Image (cartoon, helix red, strand yellow):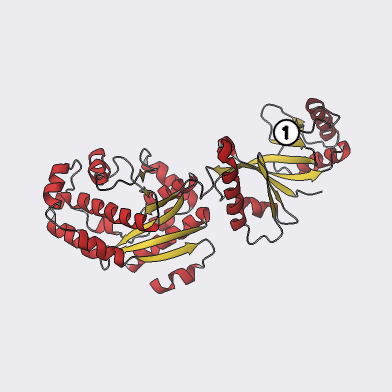
């Protein structure tokens, strides 16, 4: 005997009512994109759960890939046996023996097939007695077992499962619209992108590049961060904006204390124009309330004035240490701390305004025509499309 299926449970997707089918179809599509290296897998969807028929593939490697896909609440490795008591006993015993570091167990039976002659509670006793009489090292613990042997007796067959493996949760990427992520080289914005992906949003990124003040290695760092995010979103476009001339103009024409605020406003103006051009419905930032001068409530109010686009701020109430923890978990932290500055750090004024006023901003900004600068930027945007399968050498060799 061997585990020959993985059973996927949907979690939040199960609550989507009439729209549930489209979420399930997108999850199936996303899984197939992950499974290109597994030629024998067969994915079968149903309304309540999804079945992956392994056909000889390594279930542990398949589980690893599933744990990178949003929309999966939990998984079980399972074996499919006939609706026969002896076959079910044999499968349950195999599942228990395969459980690692387990000393206690319980059996939970569900019987959607009401034609099966033994009820759920009685089947729990039959299987529990069989497991105890054929092993020496296990005891029953119905409250807090090391492993739960789950048995689902369905119309076509019985599925026997051992333990439960957590998925990422969330919603399948591609089900809730798209967003343009303002991706710097720091810790916060990649985490914001990850959390947007978790809500089913398809992410593209915009990066403001200011050579020679920011280096090609800083640009490479951003592309590396984007490549890491493709692990969870399959593909990601990065729009690289030449920001040097506009940034210099801002800090030449605007009083120093307000320069950062005006720069952020220009970033949103450029981002909105690019999003509109690309058919993107929202912007996403890595802002966290009170973290820096441009992220006070007053600053965000003034900066937000220049766009009518919804701005998603997944980190707005999070502590920095919480953000760092997530960045470590998703693999972006070590990239983010590389010592290559982005345009937001090289032009930081000594005393930026933490409570800018709109009337002051308009007093300084309105006499200056920034429109030609924005148009020039949009004409010279460089777009790089990165996929999870893209070899890093091919992506970045021109930057070395």
Q: Position of residue 317 (x, y in %)?
A: 36, 37
Q: Nearer the viewer, residue 187 or 252?
A: 252
- Identify whether 362 is placed above or below 225: above
Q: How many marks?
A: 1
Q: Position of residue 68 (x, y in %)?
A: 56, 51
Q: Is residue 350 visible?
A: no
Q: Nearer the viewer, residue 360 or 93?
A: 360
Residue drawn 63% across the image and 61% down it? 36
Residue drawn 75% across the image and 50% down it? 4
Residue drawn 15% across the image and 49% down it? 257
Q: Position of residue 308 (x, y in %)?
A: 30, 45
Q: Position of residue 289 (x, y in %)?
A: 31, 40
Q: Is residue 202 visible?
A: yes
Question: Which quadrant of the figure has residue 254?
Answer: bottom left
**Is 91 on the left-hand or right-hand side of 20?**
right
Q: Nearer the viewer, residue 372 or 107?
A: 372
Say few, some or many: other residues with alpha carbon within 10 Å of mark 1 (under 14 / 14 to 19 / 20 or more).
some
Q: Which residue is mark 1?
A: 104
The local secondary structure at tag 1 comes to strand
**Is 243 on the left-hand or right-hand side of 38?**
left
Question: Which quadrant of the figure has residue 134?
Answer: top right
Q: Residue furthest front?
A: 18
Q: Quadrant of the C terminus?
A: bottom left
Question: Which quadrant of the figure has residue 75?
Answer: top right
């Amino acid at each position: 005997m061997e585990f020959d299926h993985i059973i996927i449970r949907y979690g939040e997707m199960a609550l989507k009512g009439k729209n549930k089918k489209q979420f399930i179809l997108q999850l199936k599509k996303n899984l197939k994109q992950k499974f290109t290296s597994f030629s024998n897998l067969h994915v079968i969807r149903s309304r309540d759960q999804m079945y992956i028929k392994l056909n000889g593939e390594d279930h542990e490697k398949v589980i690893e890939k599933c744990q990178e896909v949003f929309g999966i609440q939990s998984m079980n490795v399972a074996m499919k046996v006939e609706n026969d008591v002896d076959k079910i006993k044999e499968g349950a015993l195999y599942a228990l023996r395969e459980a690692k570091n387990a000393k206690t167990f319980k059996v939970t039976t569900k019987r959607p097939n009401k034609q099966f002659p033994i009820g759920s509670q009685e089947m729990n006793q039959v299987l529990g007695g069989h497991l105890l009489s054929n092993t020496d090292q296990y005891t029953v613990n119905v409250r807090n077992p090391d492993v739960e042997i789950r048995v689902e007796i369905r119309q076509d067959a019985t599925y026997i499962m051992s333990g439960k493996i957590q998925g990422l949760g969330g919603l399948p990427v591609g089900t809730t619209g798209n967003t343009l992520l303002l991706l710097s080289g720091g810790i916060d914005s990649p985490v914001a992108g990850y959390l947007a992906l978790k809500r089913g949003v398809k992410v593209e990124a915009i990066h403001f590049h200011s050579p020679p003040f920011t280096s090609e290695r800083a640009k490479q760092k951003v592309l590396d961060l984007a490549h890491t995010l493709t692990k969870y979103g399959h593909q990601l476009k990065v729009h690289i904006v030449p920001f040097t001339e506009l940034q210099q103009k801002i800090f030449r024409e605007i009083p120093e204390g307000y320069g950062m605020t005006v720069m952020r406003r220009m970033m949103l103006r450029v981002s909105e124009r690019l999003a509109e051009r690309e058919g993107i419905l929202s912007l996403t930032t890595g802002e966290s309330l009170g973290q820096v001068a441009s992220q006070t409530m007053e600053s965000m109010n003034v900066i937000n004035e220049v766009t009518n686009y919804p701005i998603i701020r997944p980190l707005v109430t999070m502590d920095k240490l919480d953000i760092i923890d997530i960045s470590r978990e998703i693999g972006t932290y070590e990239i983010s701390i590389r010592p290559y500055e982005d345009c937001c750090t090289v032009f930081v004024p000594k005393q930026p305004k933490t409570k800018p006023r709109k009337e002051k901003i308009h007093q300084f900004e309105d006499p200056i025509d920034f429109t030609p600068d924005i148009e020039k930027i949009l004409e010279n945007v460089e777009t790089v499309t990165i996929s999870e399968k893209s070899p890093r050498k091919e992506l970045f060799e021109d930057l070395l």
